[in-house]
């Protein structure tokens, strides 16, 4: 649930603090823009606005702060346009003859820096998130987030129904978008992928495709299999692998990012 809030200060004194419930269809980006617009409207209506020169809008969201007074076509576009239109009327507000016209200015304030005024606005936003929200349309940012969640969920469902059995046996259910193993040297990555798929220098693979001149046995005398590296007495003498039962060690080394990194480091020694 999203909520917005603002606090208005003048001459070091708090004049107003307000909370706005936004509901589940808005994001933090939208909430910050909504708070800026609502706070500006409230500041315009204060009887002390006639004494003010500039209206400072202080935000801890850098993206909103940089876009608030500029043309914008993203999420909460209507809010941004309303804020720009309102800011242009600051000069025409009622003020004393000796009060300069000033302008609406934007200031980025880093969050979580114990600034009392910013903390007051954050508390107001938290109260807004806890309030019963009105029915509201989805914002662009909210739709993007939900579409991303649904896409990842659909990919997960698809993978669970189409993943090769060898990958399921290795507990490879999903993978990060930027897999670190893709940065491995190609020879190491090739050996890892061969062990996962069974497509490589293995006895069963050569027999399946009738490779007559293939060497089916390891130097230790055992048949070449995708997981033979874990049991090869020659390899284990040179550099031992992590201990544990094969039913746990093999999926860890071939099916997890951390295990794959350890296996790649081990393979690089040969």
Image: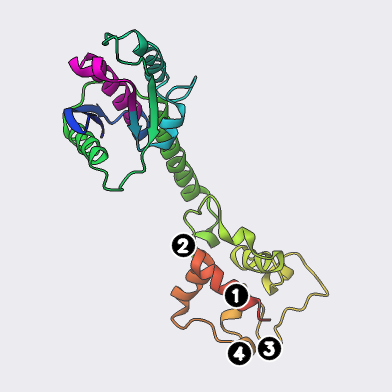
Q: Is residue 136 visible?
A: no
Point out the stretch of residues depicted in magenta.
31-56
Mark 2 or mark 3, which is nearer to you?
2
Mark 1 or mark 2, which is nearer to you?
1
Q: Quadrant of residue 104?
A: top left
Magenta stretch: includes residue 186: no
- Distance from label 4 to label 2 (Cα)? 26 Å
Residues at badges 1 and 3 in contact (C-beta under 8 Å)?
no
* Residue 206 position within the rendered picture, expressed as x and y whole percent measured from the top left: 74, 70
- Residue nearest the observer in this picture, 77 or 134: 77
- The image shows residue 116, relative to residue 17, as above or below, that is below
Residue 265 disc label: 1
Residue at x 31% of width, y 48% of height: 113
Question: In the rendered image, which residue does mark 2 sit on?
Answer: 171
Residue at x 30% of width, y 47% of height: 112
Residue farthest along the right direction in this orientation: 213
């Amino acid at each position: 649930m999203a909520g917005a809030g603002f606090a208005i200060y003048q001459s070091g004194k708090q004049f107003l603090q307000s909370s706005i419930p936004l509901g589940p269809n808005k994001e933090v980006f939208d909430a910050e823009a909504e708070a800026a617009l609502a706070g500006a409207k409230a500041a315009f209506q204060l009887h002390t606005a006639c004494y003010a020169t500039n209206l400072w809008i202080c935000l801890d969201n850098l993206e909103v702060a940089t876009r608030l007074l500029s043309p914008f076509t993203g999420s909460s576009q209507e809010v941004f346009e309303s804020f720009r239109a309102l800011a242009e009327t600051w000069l025409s507000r009622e003020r004393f003859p000796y009060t300069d016209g000033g302008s609406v200015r934007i200031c980025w304030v880093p969050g979580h820096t114990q600034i009392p005024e910013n903390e007051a606005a954050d508390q107001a936003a938290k109260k807004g998130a806890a309030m019963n929200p009105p029915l509201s349309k989805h914002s662009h940012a909210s739709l993007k987030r939900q579409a991303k969640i649904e896409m990842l969920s659909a990919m997960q469902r698809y993978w669970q129904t189409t993943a090769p059995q060898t990958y399921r046996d290795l507990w490879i259910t999903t993978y990060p978008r930027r897999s670190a193993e893709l940065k491995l040297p190609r020879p190491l990555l090739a050996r890892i992928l061969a062990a996962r798929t069974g497509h490589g220098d293995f006895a069963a693979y050569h027999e399946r495709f009738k490779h007559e001149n293939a060497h089916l046995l390891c130097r230790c005398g055992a048949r070449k299999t995708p997981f033979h590296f874990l049991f090869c007495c020659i390899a284990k003498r040179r550099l031992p692998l992590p201990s544990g039962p094969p039913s746990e060690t093999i999926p860890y080394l071939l099916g997890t990012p951390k295990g794959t990194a350890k296996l790649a480091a081990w393979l690089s020694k040969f």
